[in-house]
Amino acid sequence: MGSANKATHGKIRTVIPITEKDLTMSRFKKASHVLWCCQYHIVWTPKYRFRILKNNVGREVYKQIRISCEQLEIEIVELNVQLDHVHLLVKIPPKLSVSQVLGHLKGRTAIRLFNKFPYLRKKKLWGNHFWSRGYCVDTVGVNEEMIRKYVKYQEKHEHEDNQLSLKGM
């Protein structure tokens, strides 16, 4: 984009022409008859908030979420698998509801985990359920960058908080 100089009361200011389209359309996606930007921050936990999402189990959860989102044409903005919860910042097409997406993600990852790690199925309290029933969801608007960084660095913040609480003992 070029710039133009304009004189204002003896002062010269540079004006960069920006169209309204540049300001509003860049965050939107286009489908056949829909212009959309449906972005969500979603958090969910394993049943009883067990700290089980470590090592190979955590890596498998990460991998299966990526695969499922690609199949559903969901854009992952950030994904962070913690020991006892998952943070997911995604752009979900309007043809899908958040509950449909979470049902799919939790179902597919649970099936895959139970097949790949049979010892998980033998946990006395779990039965055939890996994930807790609920989840937390928040819509993301202009504060996207702040939420993206929060999700990305969640583990670091949690570690720092734990260190501070241990020092207070």
Image (spheres, rainbow, N blue to C red):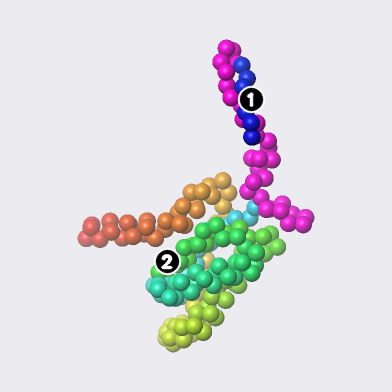
Q: Is residue 79 above or below residue 25?
A: below
Specify the quadrant of the image occupied by residue 40.
Answer: bottom right
What range of the chain is rendered magenta? 8-36
Q: Residue at x 37, y 58 (%)?
A: 156
Kindly identify the amino acid type of the residue bearing the numbered disc 2.
Answer: Gln
Task: Name the quarter where the N terminus is drawn.
Answer: top right
What is the x, y in percent for residue 146? 48, 49
Residue ID for mark 2: 82
Bin the neighbour count of mark 1 within 10 Å (Cα to Cα): few under 14, some 14-19, many 20 and up: few
Q: Which residue is mark 1?
A: 4
User: In the picture, residue 64 is in which quadrant?
Assistant: bottom right
59 sits to left or right of 157: right
Helix, strand or loop under label 1:
strand
Q: Can I make out residue 48 in this image?
A: no
Query: Looking at the image, which residue is at 22% across and 60% down?
Result: 169
Closer mark to the observer between disc 1 and disc 2: 1
- Tell me the kind of residue under disc 1: Ala
